Image (cartoon, rainbow, N blue to C red):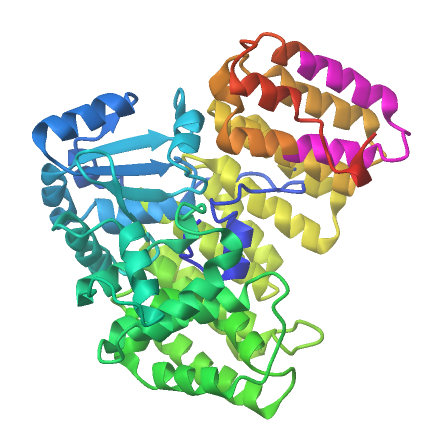
Amino acid sequence: MPRILPLALLLALAACSQAPDPQTTAATAPAVVPATAPVAAPAPSVAQIAWEKGDVDAAFAKAKAENKPVFLYWGAVWCPPCNQVKATIFSRQDFIERSRYFVPVYLDGDSKSAQKQGARFKIGGYPTMILFTPDGTEITRLPGEIDADQYMRVLALGMNGARPVKATLAAALASGRGTAATRLTPEDWRMLAYYSWDTDEQTLIPRKDVAATLRQLAQACPPEQTTTATRLKLKAMAAGATAPGAKPRDDKAARDDLRKVLADPRIAREDFDLVTGYAREITGHVTLPKSDERAALAAAWDDVLRQLAADPKLSATDRLSAVGARIDLAKLDAPDGKVPEALVADARDAAARGDRETTDLYARETVINAAAHVLAAAGLLDESDALLTAELARSNTPYYAMLGLAGNARKRGDKAAAVDWAEKAYAAATGPATRLQWGVSYVNALVDLTPEAAARIEKAAGQVIGELEAAPDTFYDRNHRYLERMTRKLLAWNKGRQHQDSVQRLRAQLAGVCAKLPAGDPARKACDGLWNAPKAATA
């Protein structure tokens, strides 16, 4: 999921890339409080985009016939970053006008065949936005977390004859090795710097090679292209800091580069998505724990985050992400995880301002969840609950806010409330892919928090399986990943064979669904293989 928010906040929001895992739902939940502030309807301009829906092949045929690029948007109605994109990019008049020069295609994750199409285009997280040539060649993946003005510039570059990013990457890496290669233009380097590596899904390179590849690009980018070279350096640092097995180190060169970024308000503002999204991760990676270098870097970074949180040109969600990053940074070397009182007050003020000032429906879906997380991260769990509970009555997707309530209950150690909120979220969810995702999250929460509740676990898993449509398209992409996650969780739950009867009944139920799929379809094999868990989890 694009990083609109800091890592901890993304995890809380499910980042949309990885579906929410409530771990909780609400017999003990507070009553829903009616909304008191008026909420505006979705911006009319969003509807002015002539989205093609459903038949993707027909949209590509139209694009070829009209010699227009294709703009593919993959999203979900509940996804906060998707609603952020709708509020800050799709509602812009210049985006709407530009959309007349490409064929805009919208794939909702709950629409028929959406999951199969997601697998076809190697799409995993919501939102993903891809630009194609009229003949269907992928040009680039657009990052939804950047400033809307930057987004429009990258979109224009892609539409104005930019070569496919795959070819650009190959040329850039060749030039970095000193090999004679086609000279890259500043526009080529910019396309690489603003490529959505978070939604790449290994279309360009294996995931394990992303950090090293970004380091190569950062070294190869001509230094005179200051802003582009700086962004590539930051991307490389972020990828290195979040790579599996990353450990703290004393990296003076990286700190010197970071000080230059943090000392330049223009650059920090241009790369605010990285500055707010990876503050804790990068600081923790390039300094040693409790060192003077870490304290100095954290202080400088906090000053910049404070300025971004007050920047009226940033969206409310982006300003909240800066506050969330400050909280994450403050906890980096705090053994008790406590946040300074002044920062707690800032978190409370930022959340109240976001709630008070945000009336656009799309923006509000993101802002309230972000504000609730900031409050929870600051230790204000009751205030976070109150904000989320008040929003249930007016949100189009209250089941998403319920996940925040589930998470808060879990932080308190209230397992009963946590699983009850997860159950309520599943009951309220709509759409086949969404219900599957929320159902799996509920089952997993039950197993994690109340493993002794065998009857409830079997009933919940049986309901998830019972709602599966016995059609091939059901067993692709995200759907398959979530089903696999559930079956592995159940196998681990039955590791000692103490729940063998329950698991055997669930196996038989799923086998009945698989048997209805065409024998030669890949989906049949995928369905039959859902119980093939690692040896450690087999039952």
Residue 346 among those drawn in magenta: no
Farthest residue to the bottom: give it.
Answer: 292
Whole-percent x, y for residue 269 in the image: 30, 72
Q: Is residue 424 visible?
A: no
Q: Is residue 535 left or right of residue 124?
A: right
> Which residue is depicted at the point 32% across and 72% down?
178
The front one of 171 and 464 is: 171
Residue 508 among those drawn in magenta: yes
> Which residue is depicted at the point 40% across and 35% down?
76
The front one of 139 and 237 is: 139
The front one of 215 and 294 is: 215
* Picture quadrant where residue 456 is located: top right
Whole-percent x, y for residue 154 in the image: 21, 56
Q: Is residue 498 left or right of residue 167?
A: right
Position of the C terminus by quadrant: top right
Q: Is residue 419 left or right of residue 127?
A: right
Residue range of the region highlighted in magenta in the rendering: 485-511
Q: Is residue 96 above or below residue 6?
A: above
* Picture quadrant where residue 378 is located: bottom right
Whole-percent x, y for residue 313 in the image: 25, 66
> Which residue is depicted at the point 46% across and 57% down?
371
